[in-house]
Image (cartoon, rainbow, N blue to C red):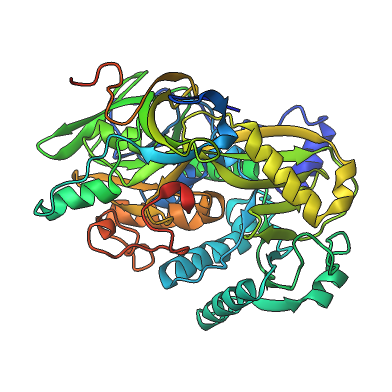
């Protein structure tokens, strides 16, 4: 069913009791042309683009929990493409361009809101780095604008831009087209659109093994039985190491918990996304009015979706240093998600060394904004058996070849990216 | 907040410690193959379950030691001074 003003009016006549389900809940077939493991944004987007761009219909998405219940529903919804290095810049800019048309593409409002993403500078060195990155972005055709302290103070009256501030604001790099989107809506929109093209979305179905015969994929073992296929795409960031290990592959990835928190909801007080690399903090206001914020990883390997309090304390300390008036708010909820942290801070969208096996993962903190391009390029890689120029650099082999894409220059210390 | 048992100072708050990563990776000899070096620098088992890892009591005695911690629950199962075995290690 196409959602429109007419379908809304028609269903209003029936008190909204006759809306059809947004997707089916089929039982798994014994065999599929391709199986995508992971029913979050990346897996659903992969399935959608396999069906739409490549005409594959015989696809299943296997999800151990419910659709969008992992990191898709746990991130802080920020969308941006303000990267310095060419492979990241081109990839995330492709994703941002897909975001701009995504609601129309999926016939589902993903609430993409280009409210701007502002990275604060607190020192002359910060300004130099922001100028350098901003210039690199502009050379790559991406919007970037340097704002003075006075301009930031005018735009964000809550931000402490005084000379006496603990972290004085000297300027900031703004990407005006960056912003936020509704995280759940992205999963639901891709799920509904994929289902409409015949993709089987199978929830409560955990993959427990990957069957490899003569170096090629033969199928997957699941909690609902064996399913045969020659193509498996992994989209399970947070757990990529575990799934790859089922096929005998070790990855340059560690799993770490990243926390986020929201305040109680208030009237509009912040109409842009503000981040500070120096104090490890980012904040935006959701449509419901909650201030959504986050900071660093928990700094030790974890598959627990629960974090520890020192990081929460750090995030709130940074918040109050930058926005003293937010001290009147209460923390309403905190939660954690499990992130794939790669050895260079950049993702892996590539074939793996078993025939028919591919992955999109290693998203570190940045997976949500990548969702559309990740799905598009993963689908391309699955069908063509080779990467698109836009994901050609995001291989597994780059680590052994000295071709790492290390935006921060942190080296092979995954929790430092 | 984790309560981490320093082998010298006893249980202390997590905020006194610095994480040092996977303790099972072993530096290969200088003439090892390129594949062995790539594995040492980049590849990790990343288990969901007991994980042997390095911690430094950086705001205390500043000494390094090993901890075996369950990455699913944060339960600390054992600790050991450098050179001393963790339960199940080969003697």
Front residue of this view, candidates B62 and A31:
B62
Task: Say if residue A22 shows up in the picture.
Answer: no
- The residue that appears at 27% across and 60% down in the rendered structure is A398
Q: Position of residue A289 (x, y in %)?
A: 83, 45
**Quadrant location of the N terminus of chain A?**
top right
Task: Say if residue B78 shows up in the picture.
Answer: yes
- The residue that appears at 46% across and 64% down in the rendered structure is A407
Q: Position of residue B34 (x, y in %)?
A: 14, 55
Callout count? 0
Q: Position of residue A346 (x, y in %)?
A: 42, 57
Above or below A320: residue A402: below
**In the image, is A215 to the left or to the right of A77?**
left
Above or below A291: residue A92: below
- The residue that appears at 45% across and 65% down in the rendered structure is A88
Above or below A130: residue A18: above
Q: Position of residue A321 (x, y in %)?
A: 79, 53
């Amino acid at each position: 069913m196409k959602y429109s003003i007419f379908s809304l009016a028609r269903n209003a006549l029936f008190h909204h009791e006759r809306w059809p389900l947004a997707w089916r809940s089929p039982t798994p077939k014994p065999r599929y042309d391709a199986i995508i493991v992971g029913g979050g944004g990346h897996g659903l987007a992969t399935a959608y683009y396999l069906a739409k761009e490549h005409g594959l219909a015989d696809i299943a998405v296997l999800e151990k929990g419910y659709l969008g219940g992992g990191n898709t529903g746990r991130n802080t919804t920020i969308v941006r493409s303000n990267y310095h290095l060419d492979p990241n810049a081109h990839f995330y800019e492709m994703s941002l361009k897909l975001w701009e048309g995504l609601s129309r593409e999926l016939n589902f409002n993903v609430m993409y809101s280009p409210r701007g993403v502002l990275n604060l500078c607190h020192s002359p060195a910060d300004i130099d780095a922001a100028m350098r990155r901003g210039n690199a972005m502009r050379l790559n055709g991406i919007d970037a604008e340097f704002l003075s302290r006075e301009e930031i103070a005018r735009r964000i009256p809550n931000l402490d831009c005084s000379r006496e501030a603990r972290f004085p604001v000297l300027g900031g790099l703004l990407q005006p087209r960056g912003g936020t989107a509704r995280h759940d809506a992205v999963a639901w929109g891709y799920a509904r659109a994929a289902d409409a093209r015949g993709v089987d979305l199978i929830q409560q179905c955990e993959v427990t093994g990957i069957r490899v015969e003569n170096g090629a994929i033969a199928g997957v073992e699941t909690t609902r039985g064996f399913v045969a296929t020659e193509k498996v795409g992994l989209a399970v960031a947070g757990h990529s190491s575990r799934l790859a290990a089922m096929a005998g592959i070790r990855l340059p990835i560690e799993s770490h918990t990243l926390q986020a928190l929201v305040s109680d909801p208030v009237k509009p007080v912040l109409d842009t996304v503000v981040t500070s690399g120096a104090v490890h903090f980012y904040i935006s206001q959701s449509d419901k009015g909650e201030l959504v914020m986050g900071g660093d990883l928990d700094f030790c390997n974890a598959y627990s979706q629960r974090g520890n309090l020192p990081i929460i304390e750090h995030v709130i300390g940074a918040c109050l240093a930058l926005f003293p008036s937010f001290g009147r708010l209460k923390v309403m909820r905190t939660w954690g998600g499990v992130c794939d942290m790669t050895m260079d801070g950049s993702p892996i969208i590539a074939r793996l060394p078993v025939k028919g096996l591919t992955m999109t993962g290693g998203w570190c903190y940045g997976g949500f904004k990548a969702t559309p391009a990740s799905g598009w390029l993963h689908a391309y890689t699955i069908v063509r058996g080779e990467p698109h120029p836009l994901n050609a650099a995001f291989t597994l082999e780059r680590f052994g070849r000295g071709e790492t894409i290390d935006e921060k220059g942190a080296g092979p210390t995954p929790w430092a990216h | 907040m984790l309560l981490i048992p320093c082998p010298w100072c006893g249980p202390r708050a997590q905020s006194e410690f610095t994480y040092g990563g996977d303790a099972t990776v072993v530096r290969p000899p200088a003439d090892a193959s390129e594949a062995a070096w790539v594995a040492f620098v980049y590849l990790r088992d990343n288990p969901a379950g007991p994980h042997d890892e390095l911690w430094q009591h950086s705001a205390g005695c500043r000494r390094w030691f090993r901890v075996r911690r369950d990455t699913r629950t944060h339960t600390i199962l054992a600790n050991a001074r450098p050179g001393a075995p963790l339960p199940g290690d080969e003697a």
